[in-house]
Amino acid sequence: MTDEMFHVKPDLAASAHVNAQRHGLMTNHALNEPDSFWLEQARRLDWFRMPTLAGGGGFEGEVRLSWFSDGTLNASVNCLDRHLPENGDRIALIWQGEAEDDVRHVSFRALHAEVCRLANVLKGLGVRRGDRVATYLPMVVEGVVAMLACARIGAVHVVMFAGFSAAGVANRLRDSGAVLLLTADEGRRGGKRIALKALADEALAILETEGGSPVRQVLVVPVIGTPVPMRAGRDLDYARLVGEAEPDCAPEEMGAEDPLLILYTSGSTGAPKGLLHTTGGYLLWASLTQEIVFDHRPGDVFWCTADLGWVTGHSYVVYGPLSNGGTSLLFEGTPSWPEPGRWWRVIDKHRVRGFYTAPTAIRSLMREPSSVLAASSRDSLRVLGSVGEPINPEAWLWFHEEVGGGRCPLVDSWWQTETGGIMIAPLPGAVAQKPGSATLPLPGVCPVLVGHDGTVLEGATQGEAEGRLCIARSWPGQARTVWGDHARYVQTYFSTYPGLYFSGDGARRDSDGYYWITGRVDDVVNVSGHRIGSAEVEAAIGSHEAVAESAVIGVPHAVKGQSLMAFVILRGGGGGEAGPALEAGIARHVGHMLGRYAVPDRVLLVPDLPKTRSGKIMRRILRKVATGEHEQLGDVSTLADPTVVDALVARLGQ
Ligand code: WTA
C-alpha cells in the first residue's frame, strides 16, 4: 500500500509552478552552478541593493555561514509595500476568531498602515535596530503586525508560544535580552481564557527578583477587553499608542545577514536554544518554498494551522504567504471547538485553497464520525500539506482521499526550526507522491544519510539506505547561529558528523530515492508535532522538592505520535500512600515550569533507574520496558544492576 503512487491531477500538473522537467533543470542548476542558481532565486525578492554574492559557506571549523551578504532589503517591504501599487486592496490576512462572527479581513494597505503605526510606536519607545522585541500573544492579527513592525525598524523578533508558562517566558526573555514585550490582556483557547498579562507579570517578577529584567516596557493588546493591572512607567496600552501613531514609517535598509528573528527550540540537552535567522536568506527560503511547494498563486487563501509561536507559523502563516501576495488565514480556535467539524466549516467559509496542518490533528479528526466531514464540501481545496511529525499511511490516505476528495496533491514536508523552511517535499505537478514519504529534496537541498557508526553511507545521496539524516551543503534558509552561544551551534549541529549538518532525525531512502523520515534519533520527543527535550522536562521535574532524579522518554501514542512518560525517584526513596497524589503533583509542577504542552501523560515513581556503571541513564531500556518489549532488551551487559529492570517491569504492571 505504501508504495502506491498518487499522481497529481493533470489540471494542476499542467499549470504548476514547477513541472517534472523544470524540477530536474533547477536541481541540476543548483548542483552544478550554485552561485548562479541562488542569485537567480534571490531576484524573487525586492532589494534596495541587489546582491552580487551568493555565498553559503562550509560546515567545517567555525561554521560562519553567509548568504547574499552585499545585498540590502527589508522583510516588511517584501511582505507589504511591494503589493501596494497593484494589490493594496487585496486581503492579506483573514482572521477567524473563536466565535463564528468574529472575523476580520485586513487588506495589504490596512496591514501596512497598522505595521507602520506600531513601528513608529516602537521607535518612539526607544527600540533600535538590533534590539530584541518579544511577543507573548494569542493567534490575533496583532501577532503578525508585531513581527512585521520589528522587521520594519530592524528589531529582532522573539515570538513566544502563548502556551508557555511564566518560567518558560522568563527564560526566553532573559536569554534573548528582550527590551520590550508585547502581550495581551488575555487569550482564548477552546472556550477557556489564558491570563497572558498575569503570566507575563509573573515572568517579569522572576527576572526582577534575579536582579534585573532586560524588559523596559510592556505593550498590552486589549484582545478580550479584560481590565488588567498596569504598572505605571512600564506597562502601556497598545490600542491607545498605535491609534495615535502615524501610518507611515520608512523601512530600515537591512543587510541580508542582519538578524530578523530568534526562535527557541528544544534539543537533546540543556535549555531551549535561540536559533537566529537572518533577513535575506530566511525570507528567500520562506517565499520560494511557499510558492513551489504549495503551488501558490497570488490571492490564494492559504491556511497553515500552526501557531505563530512555532517556526511553521513564522514561515507559512506570515513570511511565505505575505511575501508572495497571498491571503493568509489566521484562526484563533481549535479543531473541534465548540463542536466537531469547526475546521471544515472554516475551510468552506473562507474558500481555503491551500491547507497545511500536522498529522496529530489529522489522526484526531479521522476518529470523528464520517458525518462530520460530510457536512462540508471543501471544494475550494487544491493543495494539502502535512508537517511536524512522520505521517502514517492511514492518516495520509484519509487526508488525501476523504478531506481532499482524492483531487489535491498532499505534500508531506520535512523541515525544522533550524532549516527556516521546507527541505524535502513532493512539488505538486513535478513529483509523484507515496503515502508516508516526504519524497525528494527541493532543488538546492543536498541530503545525505550517515550510518550509525558515523560513516557516510556508500552512494550517500542515491540508492537504498537507512541512517541519520544530514545535509551536505548550506542553503539560504539555514539558521546562522544559536543566539549568544555560537560554540553550542557548532557543537550541536556540526560536530557529530564533521563537515555535515546533522538534523537529529533518522531516515530511509528507497530505490526511487524517496526519503521516509523515521523520527528523532536523539533525546528529543515529538508530542503532537511539538519538539520537547527529555533533558528539559527532567530539569523541570528535578526542581520539584520531593524529587531526587528522573528520566523522561517518548512512547508511541495513537493520536499524538508520541507521549511523554517520566520515571521518578524520590528523595529518600519510596512513594508509599502519597504516591498517586505526588505523581499528579509532579505533573502539575512540569506545567508550571514549562507549560501544559510539556506535561507527561504518565509520571511513575520508581525505586531505581537503569544505569550504566558510569552512572548514565539508559533510556533505551526504559523505552523497551514502557512498550512491553522487555523480553528483547538487547545488550544489557553495561547495566550496573540488571535487577532494576525487573523492578520496573513489576511497577509498570501495577
Ligand atoms: C519532525 C517543524 C517527519 C522532525 C517544521 C524534525 C517531521 C522536527 C516532518 C522539527 C515530516 C518535521 N515528517 N518528521 N514531514 N516535519 N518533522 O523544529 O523530527 O518544530 O526534526 O520544526 O519535526 O520540528 P520543528
Image (cartoon, rainbow, N blue to C red):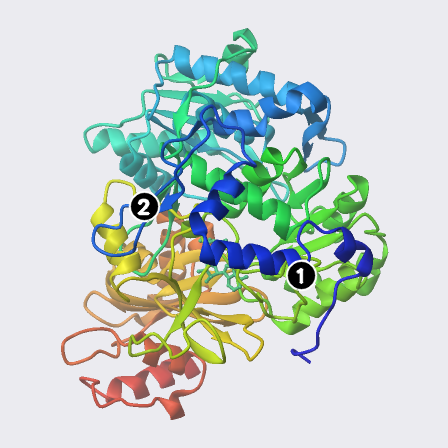
Using the image as rendered, state which of residue 301 and residue 470 is in the foreground.
470
* Residue at the left extreme, as displayed: 614
User: Image point 44% across, 61% down: which residue?
Assistant: 446
Question: Alpha-carbon neighbours of circle 2 within 10 Å: few (<14), some, or many (≥20)?
Answer: some
Q: Element at badge 1?
A: helix
Q: Give the label on residue 20, or none.
A: 1
Mark 2 lies within 8 Å of ligand 1 (Cβ measured): no
Mark found first going from the N terminus, 1 or 2: 1
Using the image as rendered, state which of residue 251 and residue 211 is in the foreground.
251
Residue denoted by label 2:
65
User: Image point 74% across, 67% down: which residue?
Assistant: 7
Identified by mark 1, the residue type is Ala
* Image quadrant occupied by the C terminus: bottom left
Question: Alpha-carbon neighbours of circle 1 within 10 Å: few (<14), some, or many (≥20)?
Answer: some
* Image quadrant occupied by the N terminus: bottom right
In the image, residue 614 sits, relative to residue 87, either above or below, namely below
User: Image point 38% across, 88% down: which residue?
Assistant: 630
Q: Give the label on residue 51, or none.
A: none
Using the image as rendered, state which of residue 389 and residue 629 is in the foreground.
389
In the image, residue 245 sits, relative to residue 598, either above or below, namely above
So how many labels did they put on this image?
A: 2
Identified by mark 2, the residue type is Leu
**Distance from Cα at disc 1 to Cα at disc 2:** 31 Å
- The answer to whether 350 appears left or right of 558 in the picture is right
Q: Position of residue 250 (x, y in %)?
A: 48, 14
